[in-house]
Amino acid sequence: MAWLLRLLWGLLALVAFFLAALAVNQDEIILTFLRWETPSLSVFWWLLGAFGCGLVLGLLTIPVIVARERLKHRVLSKRLAQAESELSQVPKNALQE
């Protein structure tokens, strides 16, 4: 349980450091995509938005990854059960030879 508390404090320190580093970047910039230009915002807001988008995309991909792993687990469990049933049908004398 102590490792969980250390992990939480470490994550909190990392987030605080990240936000402090972002707060230093207060220069206003304009992003240009082909001919379209964004409004003038500080680097802090652009980086925070990029971080938020990455966080949301990461959270949206978790169910896909979990579904794949569950499918793999189900397939492997069925193969294991089939192999165990085949093994139980083999006479014990044949296994000793």
Image: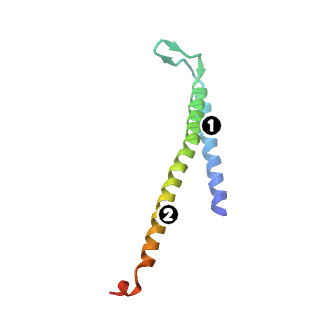
| Foreground pick, 64 / 55 | 64
| Foreground pick, 43 / 89 | 89
Q: Earlier in the sequence, mark 2 or mark 1?
A: 1
Q: Amino acid at mark 1?
A: Leu
Which secondary structure lies at badge 2?
Answer: helix
Residue 95 image position (x, y, % from top left): 37, 83
Residue 71 image position (x, y, % from top left): 51, 53
Question: Which quadrant of the rendered structure holds the N terminus?
Answer: bottom right
Q: Residues within 10 Å of mark 2 (few under 14, many from 20)?
A: few
Residue 35 image position (x, y, % from top left): 48, 12
| Foreground pick, 83 / 50 | 83
| Nearer the camera: disc 2 or disc 1 | 2
Which secondary structure lies at badge 1?
Answer: helix
Q: Which residue is mark 1?
A: 19
Q: Residue at x 48, y 63 (%)?
A: 78
Q: Residue at x 62, y 43 (%)?
A: 15
The correct choice, above or below, for 74 with respect to 59 in the image is: below
Q: Residue furthest top?
A: 35
The correct choice, above or below, for 19 with respect to 76 in the image is: above
Q: Which residue is mark 2?
A: 77
Residue 53 image position (x, y, % from top left): 57, 33
Question: Which quadrant of the rendered structure holds the C terminus?
Answer: bottom left
